[in-house]
Image: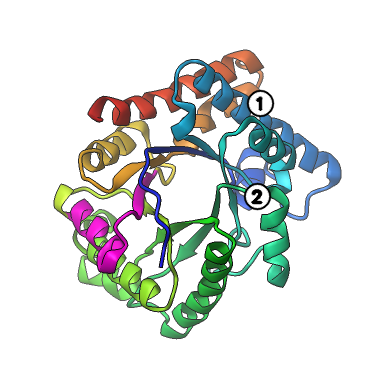
Amino acid sequence: MALGYDKPLYVLPFDHRATFSKNMFGWQEPLSPDQTAEVAAVKQVIYDAFKAAVKGGVPKDHAGILVDEQFGTAILHDAHKQGFITSCPAEKSGQHEFHFEYGESFAQHIEKFDPTFCKVLVRYNPEGDKEMNRRQAARLKQLSDFLHQSKRLYMFELLVPAEPAQLQRLGNDKKAYDRELRPALMAQAIHELQDAGVEADVWKIEGIERKEDCQKIVAAARRGGRDHVGCIVLGRGEDDRKVREWLTTAVDVPGFIGFAVGRTVFWDPLVNYRANKVTRDTAVAQIAANYRSWVDVFEKAR
């Protein structure tokens, strides 16, 4: 059974790997050591902004980072030393099916950084490829067992991409899918994963339009005595207005404890910094202010 985590949790995620180097720099994997160092230096800007936000009043006990080993080794070591909430991804980047980034040696990599949370990003549609779902669930249970035996927390980012037939039923309207179909599919996916022995402490959930659907997701996450399991809203790279809508909908639903919003917070300031339109200090200040503004949504509601 999940240990659960129900304290406020405001995560700044910048564990993007393949998409980051490709979309920010225009590079393809594998990267050279120089390229890797350049990506790592840009991620350091985000981390400096996070530290500035905490220094500026974001509660340290509730503020967390999510960053990868490939570009964030130094950041993870420093954050651990400073006593910040840390999360590391365990999934191989940019795959349709969940695979461990480091194969069977996943446990050694988790132990090396000792993060507060180990995070997975998983695409799982209950009406999708049943065999793939079974394979994924088996790997995810393996991770679940390891984390709970070693008293670590499991953060599960659940994406439920539309199947072609599901979209067809809604006239290929993605917004209609997000509103009408996805919430029930998410609850079903959570049930199926729990039944397969996958016990998340925090479910990282794509934004939901309606409060009653938020309540159903919490009910799924907390069913069967999982009373302390939390849910957080992810940003999905959406614009400011959309993310604000999602957070405002979720904020007063008990069980929704915070957010993990990344690209919406840091992308534009970083693009401008790399184009020499703003200084590094300005980029840091802008990212810190953006992150702080999402924290305020939750803090005010609390």
Q: For residue 25, say whether it is visible.
A: yes
Q: Which residues are magenta?
A: 213-234
Which residue appears at 78% of the width and 49% of the height?
31
Q: Quadrant of residue 25?
A: top right
Q: How many marks?
A: 2
Q: Quadrant of the C terminus?
A: top left
Q: Is residue 208 above or below residue 240?
A: below
SS state under label 2:
loop
Amino acid type of the residue tagged 2 in the rendering: Asp
Closer to the chain start, of discs 2 and 1, is 2
Label 1 neighbourhood size at 10 Å, few (<14), some (14-19), many (20+)? some
Any mark on residue 274, and which?
1
Locate the N terminus by quadrant: bottom left
At label 2, counting other C-alpha atoms closer than 10 Å, the crowd grade (few under 14, some 14-19, many 20 or more) is some
Q: Residue furthest right?
A: 33
Please name whichever residue, 106 or 125, is drawn nearer the observer in this view of the structure. 106
Name the element at disc 1. Answer: helix
230 shown above or below 48: below
Q: Amino acid at mark 1?
A: Arg
Residue 279 at least partly seen: no
Mark 2 = which residue? 114
Residue 103 is situated, as x and y percent measured from the top left of the image, at 70, 70
For this view, does 174 lie left or right of residue 272? left
Q: Nearer the viewer, residue 266 or 268?
A: 266
Q: Is residue 16 magenta?
A: no
Residue 219 belongs to the span the image colors magenta: yes
Q: Residue at x 73, y 43 (%)?
A: 73
Q: Position of residue 144 (x, y in %)?
A: 52, 67
Tell me how far mark 2 sits from mark 1, CA to CA: 32 Å
Nearer mark to the viewer, of 2 and 1: 2
Are dots 2 and 1 in contact, CB under 8 Å? no
Image position of 255 with respect to 274: above or below: below
